[in-house]
Image (cartoon, helix red, strand yellow):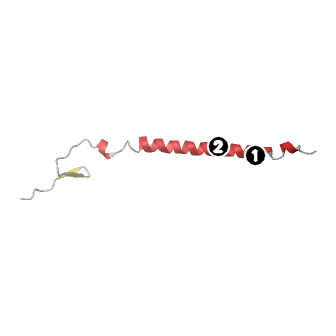
Amino acid sequence: MTVPEDMDGRPIRSARKWVKFLMIMIILVAGLSFGLWFFFISDSNSTDKNNGVLLPANCYSVNGKQTCPLPIP
């Protein structure tokens, strides 16, 4: 039994197309997931938004403790 000439190599080409399609889809989904995570989740724990305390001028906060330098006479 012989394989017709027009069918020779067709399953391999078809499989390569599916593998290529799946790889592109995986890359697109991974890129979209990372993008959404980067812009929404990583920005949610920003210290500027969580810090509701306004410090006076020339003061800073370290580990939740307010520190103000002494004025120079």
Residue in the image at 48% along x and 43% along y: 35
Q: Farthest bottom residue?
A: 73
Which of labels 1 and 2 is toward the front? 1
Of the residues under marks 1 and 2, which one precedes in the sequence?
1
Amino acid type of the residue tagged 2 in the rendering: Leu
> What numbered label is drawn on residue 56?
none
- In depth, the one of 13 and 30 nearer the eye is 13
| Residue position marked by numbered label 1 in the rendering | 13
Residue 52, position as x, y percentages in the image: 25, 41
Mark 2: secondary structure: helix
- In depth, the one of 41 and 21 nearer the eye is 21
Residue 50, position as x, y percentages in the image: 30, 42
> What numbered label is drawn on residue 22?
2
Residue in the image at 89% along x and 43% along y: 4
The number of numbered discs placed on residues in the rendered structure image is: 2
Instruction: Name the side, left or right, on which 54 lies relative to 2.
Output: left
Question: Which corner quadrant holds the C terminus?
Answer: bottom left
Amino acid type of the residue tagged 1 in the rendering: Arg
Residue in the image at 81% along x and 47% along y: 9
